[in-house]
Amino acid sequence: MQVRFLSDGSEYRSYGGGSLSQKKEGGGIFWWAILITLLMGVATFCWFFSIMIFSHPEKPFHYKMLAKFKKLTPIRPYTIYTAPNGKSFGPRDILAEFYPYNYEQLSVRNDLFKRSYLKNYQHEQPVYLLGNFRVLNVRPLAASDVFTSGWIVRARSSELEDVDVELVMPGLTKETAPFATGDTFNLQKRSYASTLHVQRMDEDRICVTVVPLAYQALAKTGDEVLTLTPPDLLNMEAYWPITRDPGSEFSMSANKSAVDAAPSVDVAAAKP
């Protein structure tokens, strides 16, 4: 009877009868497994990181990365016919809407406002601001602002003094200020003044930063048309709100005669 034993492959024997036996090397497979696992972890991290970058362009670091690699979505130049539908709030309504918010809730909502604007409102509807406002101050935008070119108007609601508005006019190349202190303007539904930021201030007041979405032509009053352009690049590291708070005790007594004589102008997108 001939008996054979099956080898498990752990050793090899020489047919010459010598002592030339050796064990099979298995250490290389272990290190290859470690390397592949690490590479899979890096790939998974990069995948989630890229999703976060593209999903939250409103974050300053994310926005800077997208701008560096030229992956920003261009801001769409809407017209009165293409502007997205959204909810419209007057001064009292918008104060009632955001008054109950705490700091964390307001921060989340502000991020959503900016994200929707940067993504051209693909998933969220804009919140439009309506009402009459009296101009407190006007100044040109600078490189240190969120919008780096154009003009910005700080105004206060004529209906409710607890509500201020920042009207951003990006790309406006007008050499003289579009409004003067004491002027009154009216934001209509056709203004498409979309909310970008809501700031809670002292004495339970709020400041709402808005930008007209119908950039191509903004009719101020009469035949005067202010031509706006969407920004190519924003400074997302800048401070919100863009202008300083003039305070609840801001008085225009020095300009009382000018205020009384100033007519109310309608700010609305002009028909192309």
Image (spheres, rainbow, N blue to C red):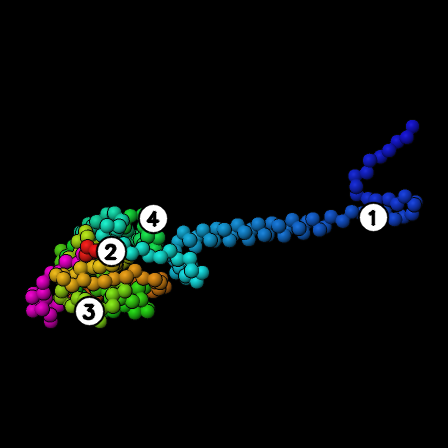
- Camera-side mark, 2 or 1: 2
Amino acid found under the numbered disc labelled 3: Ala
Bin the neighbour count of mark 2 within 10 Å (Cα to Cα): few under 14, some 14-19, many 20 and up.
many
Determine whether 92 is above or below 236 in the image. above
Quickly name the residue at label 3. 177
Q: Quadrant of residue 251?
A: bottom left
Q: Quadrant of residue 254?
A: bottom left
Q: Residue 60: say if magenta.
A: no
- Measured as percent of width and height from the top left, residue 260 is found at 7, 65
Work out whether mark 3 precedes mark 4 in sequence or the reverse, and give the earlier one: 4
Q: CA distance from mark 2 to mark 4?
A: 16 Å
| Side of 18 relative to 254 (left or right) | right
In percent of the image, x 32 and y 50: which residue is there? 121
Work out whether mark 2 precedes mark 1 in sequence or the reverse, and give the earlier one: 1
Foreground pick, 135 / 178:
178
- Camera-side mark, 3 or 1: 3
